[in-house]
Image (cartoon, rainbow, N blue to C red):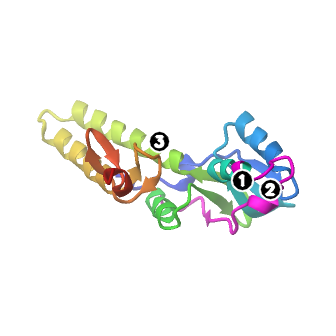
Amino acid sequence: MRNGITVRDVMNREFVGVSESDRLDEAAELMTAETAEAVVVLRGPEPIGSVSTATALAAMLEGDPHEQSVGEVMEPPVSTVAPDTALSDATQQLVSRSTTHLLVVDDDEVVGLLTEHDVLAATETVEASAVATSTTAGDTGEATETIESEAATEQSVQGICEGCGSLTPELATMNGQLVCPACRAY
């Protein structure tokens, strides 16, 4: 379904960068102000790590955020992807590495950030467009059924769990929601 779409098409070109010596509370305030899902930790122009909202929250619950530095809680190494990578390949990388974001790097320069929410938004947009196109283009219901069937199959394989919000390769419908195996166990 996502053939032809690349990371460049859906990535965030603007990202929040912090230094490893910055205080965690300052980085968290910046993440909130910029509505960022993650910050990139830079040493000069070089990315050396990242901090997701979940990591920042967990670290703040464990210690004093006024005394913790970003370098103490960052997640190294930074998972990277090239901007011309197919979105489907980047999605597999997100899932296989169990991460919420990938740093987009072109010629050793950070050019953006790709999050699991960017992938989901792009997938929903492509699916909605395909359904709308097939509905207006076809004079039989067969094309619409095929596109909708492909969308349902894709969602049942991989996506964001509506129960816990994690990106997983094993979604299934339960009580009208797409949920991961862990949420289905409850």
Asked where in the image residue 72 lies, by quadrant, the reply is bottom right
Q: Tell me which residue sits at (33%, 53%) in the image.
A: 171
Tell whether label 1 touches label 2 (CB within 8 Å): no
Compare marks 2 and 1 and give the one earlier in the sequence: 1
In three-dimensional space, the C-alpha distance between marks 2 and 1, rounded to whole angstroms, equals 14 Å
Residue 62 — which label? 1
* Image-based side of 91 in relation to 169, left or right: right
Residue 34, percent across and down? 72, 37
Asked where in the image residue 14 lies, by quadrant, the reply is top right
Tell whether label 3 touches label 2 (CB within 8 Å): no
Q: Residues within 10 Å of mark 2 (few under 14, many from 20)?
A: many
What residue is pinned by disc 3? 121
What residue is pinned by disc 2? 70
Q: Tell me which residue sits at (88%, 57%) in the image.
A: 21
* Image-based side of 32 in relation to 156, left or right: right
Tell us which disc is closer to us: 2 or 1.
1
Span colored in magenta = 61-86
Compare marks 3 and 1 and give the one earlier in the sequence: 1
What kind of residue is marked 3? Ala
Residue 18 — which label? none
What kind of residue is marked 2? Val
Q: Secondary structure at mark 1?
A: helix
In three-dimensional space, the C-alpha distance between marks 3 and 1, rounded to whole angstroms, equals 33 Å
Tell us which disc is closer to us: 3 or 1.
1
Compare marks 2 and 3 and give the one earlier in the sequence: 2
Secondary structure, magenta segment, majority class? loop
Q: Secondary structure at mark 2?
A: helix
